[in-house]
Amino acid sequence: MRVLAVGYPLPNQNIDNYSVLTAPSYFDYDAVIIDPASITRSVQELLDGEREFEAQDGRPVVNAPTTASAVSAADQVKRRGEETQRLLEAGGVVIVFGRPNATQAGLFGFEGCDRFSWLPAPTGMTWGPPSVRAAEGKSLRVVADAHPLATFLREQRPKLAYRAVFDERQPAVRAGRVLATSNAGVPIAIEFDVLAGKVIFVPALSAETGTFRGQAAEQLVDAVGFLRRDATPEVAPSWTRAVPVPGLEQVEAELEEAEADVAAATARLQEARERHDRLANHRRLLTEDGPALVATVGEALELLGFARVSAAGEPLEVESEGQRALVECEGSREQVVEWPYVRLQRRLEERLLQSGEQLHGIVVANGERAKPLDERGQQYTDALRIACENYRYGLITGDTLFALVRRALGGADEATLTGMRRRLLSGVGLLDPAVALGEAEEESESGPIF
C-alpha cells in the first residue's frame, strides 16, 4: 500500500512526503493525505522566492509558462484535479485537513488558485460556504466509534484543532457520514462518497514536530488499509460478453468442459477453504484492532453460544439466557488505554436513560498486539483496569478470549459453554484466564473503590 502526504510530513515507510508543486501523480497512490493550506503556502513561497521547487523530472518549478527546461507552477497545481478524480474513480481515499477555502493571487496562468480547486465534490456541494465554514476550536467528540479513523481521532485529540466546520443543515452535508463533532455537536470530521472513492475531512494536526507525527502516520496508514480493504474492483459491463472474438467460442466450450471435469474437486476445495478460514480467523483476536477486531470478537462470542443482538458494523451487543451485555473492543501496539471504557460507559448510560435497562458491560483489550504472546506484558493500563473494577464492567484480553475459543473448538460440552458465558456476563474487572476457563475460583470482591 502506498500513501502520499502533501504539505504535512508524516514519517512512515508507507508514506511519500511532497508538496503540491513537487509530488508525483496522485493516482499512483492508494490514498492521499493533504493539508490544503499548504497549497496556497507553497505558491506564496514560490512567488516570494523563499523556496525553490523541483518537479519529478528534475526541472525547476517556475511562475511562468512550461518550457523544455522548466515547469509552470500553474500546470503543476491544475493537473492535481484530474489526478484526484482518477484516484477516486479507482476507489482511492483522500484525507483532508479541514480548512476554510482561500485564494492566492499572482500565479501566472492560474489567478484563481485556491485550496480546493483540485478536489471533486459530491453532487450539489462545494468545499466552501454554505457547506463548509471557517471556525476555530479544539474540542472533539468521536461519534463513529466503529470507523477506521476513530483511533486516530481519539489518540491524536491533544494535537488536533478544527479550522473549519460543516453545516449539517445543508442537504449535501447530510449525505455525508459524521465521524466527530465539537462539544456543541457541530460536525468537524466527516466522510463523503465521491465517485468510487472516499473524501474524508478531519481536524488539522498541530504544526509542531515530535513523536506524535510518527504515531499519527501509523494510525492513518492503518485506517487507509481498512478503508481500501472495502473497495470493490470495477467489473466489466455485461454487454461486453456479447461482442464476438474469433476463436473465443471454441475455447469457451473447452473451458466449460474442463470446469465440469473438476467441479467435484473444486467444491471439496471450497468447503475445506471455508472451514480453514473460519478457524484461522480466530487468530485475529490476537492481532487486530478497529472494525476487524470487533467483527472477530463477535464471531468468538457467537461460537461460545451468545446470540448477537447488534447488526454487522454496529457497536457489539450480545445476549445469553435473557441477559444482555454491551461489548467494547480496542487493540493497540502499546497498552490499551481508557477509551473503550469511556465508550462503554456512554452506551450504558444512553441505554439506561432511553429504556431503563441496566446492562452488563464487557471490555475486550488486545494490547501489544504486534508482539508474540510470550513477549507481551500487561496489555491494558492500570487506569482501564481500575475503571472497569469500579464500575463493575468485565475486562478480558484478546488472548484470554482466544483460550475460550480454543476450549469451545476442542469439544466443550454445553454445560462448559454455559459456564463460560455466565462468567463473562458476571465478571467484574479483569477476568483471569483460569477463572474464565472454570479452572479456578474467582476471588471475592471488595466492592467499588469509590
Image (tube, grey):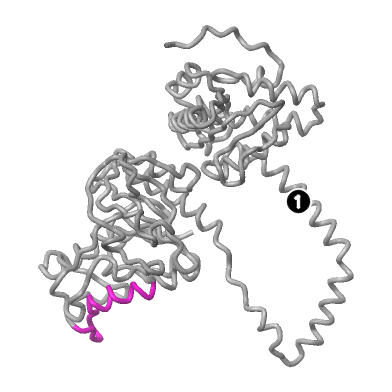
Residue 116, image x, y percentages: 29, 66
For the magenta stretch, what is the residue range?
65-83
**Residue at screen point 44% across, 73% down:** 86
Residue 245, image x, y percentages: 71, 90
Looking at the image, which is closer to me, 208 or 327? 327
Residue sitting farthest toward the left: 48
Q: In the rendered image, which residue does mark 1 sit on?
A: 274
Residue 149, image x, y percentages: 43, 48
Q: Is residue 443 above or below residue 71?
A: above
**Residue at screen point 84% across, 82% down:** 253
Q: Is residue 399 above or below residue 239?
A: above
The type of residue carrying mark 1 is Glu
Residue 78, image x, y percentages: 29, 76
Camera sees residue 267: yes
Mark 1 lies on a secondary structure that is: helix
Specify whether residue 406 is painted magenta: no
**Residue at screen point 75% across, 26% down:** 417
**Residue at screen point 69% across, 25% down:** 421
